[in-house]
Image (cartoon, grey):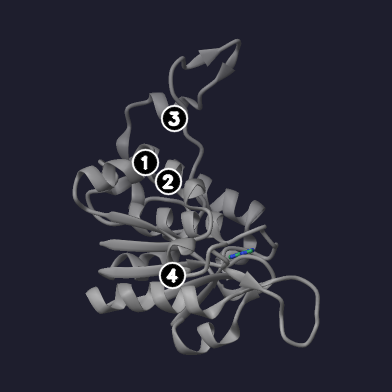
Amino acid sequence: MRIDIITVLPEMLEGFFNCSIMSRAQKKGIAEFHIHNLRDYTFDRYRKVDDYPFGGCAGMVMKIEPIDRCISALKAERNYDEVIFTTPDGEQFDQKMANTLSMTQNLIILCGHFKGIDYRIREHFITKEISIGDYVLTGGELAAAVIADAVVRVIPGVISDEQSALSDSSQDNLLAPPVYTRPADYKGWKVPDILLSGHEAKIREWEFQQSVERTKQLRPDLLK
Ligand code: ADE
């Protein structure tokens, strides 16, 4: 899978994609991340990517020309399944959307900034608008990183134990059960006996019950 990210803050994303599992996914040849600096698609000496809004309201708006040049250059090279725009007024991102996007080949993610982007970009280029939650970030970069991470980690082979992506909280609408590691007794705080019993079937049943209990308590909305 290939993900092209268009941003005015490439340095914010480069570190992220060169770490840990995202970096490993690239080394394994499963995912490619290409970060494009929107300022490289400007033609003026100030490399201007924003301008005052028509109508005189406050804030700056991302200009249409550099975004058009960048997206058009990418689309001339290959077909894209989705051209995503990160914005707080987009569709709410969730595991189901991550799973669906993980089955695509090529994605563009345009990171929003300033007061917004010239609306014609949304009308003519964007195929999917995504919000990662009901709060407003200073820019779309963190949202792009969240989306790319959640999408890529469910591609088979990215996480070494494939089971672990499938048994996540939210894949089955249940929160994960508690997990423990050694020592079994730390300052008198003990790991539940059942986990030390070696009884595989009973352990799985206990985990399931814990998942249901935690979901009822913490996220009853998931059980509806
Ligand atoms: N840009 C600013 N806030 C955002 C959010 N909550 N989701 C996606 N993009 C954003």
Q: Which residue is drawn at 32% across and 74% down?
A: 73
Kindly report the distance in space between the C-alpha atoms of the residues bearing marks 4 and 1. 24 Å
Mark toward the viewer: 1 or 3: 1
In this view, the residue farthest toward the front is 45
- Tell me the distance, in whole angstroms, between the alpha carbons under discs 1 and 3: 40 Å
Which numbered mark, 4 or 1, is in the foreground of this view? 1
| Amino acid type, label 1 | Asn
The amino acid type of the residue labelled 2 equals: Glu
Tell me the quarter of the picture where residue 219 sits. bottom right
Query: Marks 1 and 2: in contact by CB < 8 Å?
Result: yes
Q: Whole-percent x and y of residue 4?
A: 36, 63
Where residue 224 appears, as percent x and y from the top left, is 58, 71
Q: Earlier in the sequence, mark 1 or mark 3?
A: 1
Task: Give the CA distance from mark 3 to mark 2.
Answer: 44 Å
User: Mark 4: which amino acid?
Assistant: Met
Report whether the residue tagged 1 is closer than 8 Å to ligand 1.
Answer: no
Q: Name the residue under label 4.
A: 97
Q: Is residue 25 left or right of residue 188?
A: left
Q: Is mark 3 on a helix, strand or loop?
A: helix
Question: Are the residues tagged 1 and 3 within 8 Å (C-beta)?
Answer: no
- The count of marks equals 4
Label 4: how many Cα within 10 Å (few below 14, some 14–19, many 20+):
some
- Mark 4 or 1 closer to N-term? 1
Marks 4/2: CA distance?
24 Å
Label 4 with label 3: CB-CB less than 8 Å: no
Residue for badge 3: 194
Residue 154 sits in quarter: bottom left
**Residue that carries the numbered disc 2 in the rendered image:** 14
Q: Mark 1 points at which residue?
A: 18
Separation of marks 4 and 3 at Cα, in angstroms:
36 Å
The disc, 3 or 2, on the residue closer to the chain's N-terminal end is 2
